[in-house]
Amino acid sequence: MARKSTTDNKKRIEQLLMMAWNTNSVARILAIANQILELNPDCVEALVLKGDHLDDSNESIELFKRALNAIDDPNNCDPFDRDIVFLTVNQRIAFAYLGLGELDKAFEYCEVALKFEEEHQDNEYLHDETNSAMMKALYYRVLIERRDWSRILSDSMRDPDETLGRAFAKLIAAWCMSGDNAKTVCAGLFWDILTIAPDVPFYILGYMDEPDESDPPEANEDFHFSLMYYDTVAVTDELFNWFSRGTILFGLLSGRFDSKEQDYMIDAIDKLGGFEEYERMKEILLSTEDSVVIETLAANKCLTE
C-alpha cells in the first residue's frame, strides 16, 4: 500500500509541475509549489520553483539550500538531472546573495559552481553554452562588485572562454587600473564586446527596447545579460561617458538609430567629445555592416583619445 501511495504521489507531483510550467501567474505557481511540498517536503523541483518566485531573497536562499540538501535522494530529484540542478541551484544562491550585497557568500557559491563545472568537463549535458556563459557572467559580476580588479585581470587571462561577462569585467578592471592610459588600453576591449554581442551596450544604456517574442533567442540572452550588468559601466563617470561615446559612435555608423533618434544622438556624441571622430569615420566607412564598422573603428584608433 505504501508503494502505491508513493507512486500516486509522484504522478500527482508530475501533474502539478506541468500545471506550474503552463501558467504565468506567480500566485498560482506558489500555490502549486506548496501543494507539491505537502506531498513531498523535499521535492527539489518544488523547492526551486517556490524559491524562484518569492520576493524575500533570504527565504528563497533557505529553500535553495534545502534543495541542495535533498538533491542526492532519487525520490526528491531525478538522478539524471542531479548535476545540472546542483549547478543551477548554486547559481541561484549566489545571485540571491549578490542582490543582498553579501558578496563573500555570493563569491563562495560561484566558486563551488565553477569548480563543479570544471570537474565534470566530460558531461556535455552539464556544459550548456548559455548556462555556462551566465555562470561566468555572475562570477565576474561579483568580482566587479567587490572591486577586485587584479583578480578579474588574472582570472580573465586564464579563462579560455571568450564570454561576454569576461569581456565586460576585463574592460572595467583595465579602465580602473590604467589611470591616464585607460582609453588607449580599453579601446580594443570595447571592440571585443561589440564583436561578441553588438546590441548589449545599447540595452545597457537604454537605447534599445526589451526584445519581444518575434526576436531571436539571442536577443533575450543579450537583454538578460544587460540587466545583470546595467550599472557596471557607471563605476566611474569617466568610464560611463567614454562607453556611451563609443556606443553612440558605433550606433550611428552601423545604422542602429532611426531618423528621429539620429539628431539627438549626434548632439549627445558632440557633448561627449566624439563629434569630430564621428564625422571623420562617416567619410571613411563604405558599409554599415557591424564587422566592417568595428574593424574600421579599431584600425583608425577610435576612442583612444
Image: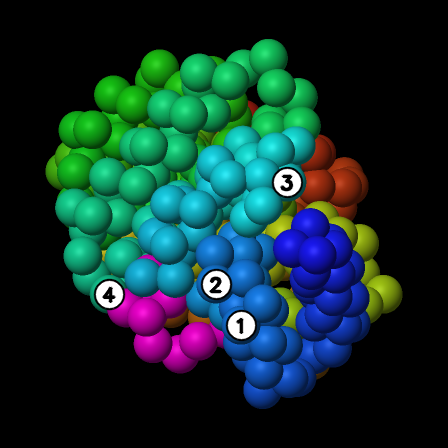
Type of amino acid at the residue the image marks with label 3? Asp
Say which of marks 3 and 1 sits in front: 1
Mark 1 residue crowding within 10 angstroms, few (<14) / some (14–19) / many (20+) = few
Residue 267 versus residue 83 in the image, above or below: below
Residue named by callout 4: 100
Quarter of image, res 274: bottom left
**Tag of residue 41:** 2
User: Label 2 crowding class (10 Å Cα cut-off): few <14, some 14-19, many 20+?
Assistant: some
- Which residue occupies the extreme right position in the image? 214
Residue drawn 17% across the image and 29% down it: 150
Q: Secondary structure at mark 3?
A: loop
| Closer mark to the observer between disc 2 and disc 3 | 2
- Does residue 281 appear in the picture of this structure? no
| Residue 38 placement, left or right of 16 | left
Q: Which residue is under mark 3? A: 78
Measured in 3D between alpha carbons, the distance from the residue under mark 1 to the one under mark 4, in whole angstroms, is: 29 Å
Q: What whole-number distance in Å separates the C-alpha atoms at marks 2 and 1?
A: 6 Å
Distance from the alpha carbon under mark 2 to that under mark 4: 26 Å
Residue 175 lies, in percent from the top left, at 25, 40
Is 27 on the left or on the right of 216, as rendered?
Answer: left
* Cβ atoms at labels 2 and 1 below 8 Å apart: yes
Q: Is residue 241 left or right of residue 188?
A: left
Coloured how? rainbow
From the image, state whether disc 4 or disc 3 is nearer to you. 3
Residues in magenta?
A: 53-61
Report helix, strand or loop for mark 1. Answer: helix
Which residue matches tag 1? Answer: 38
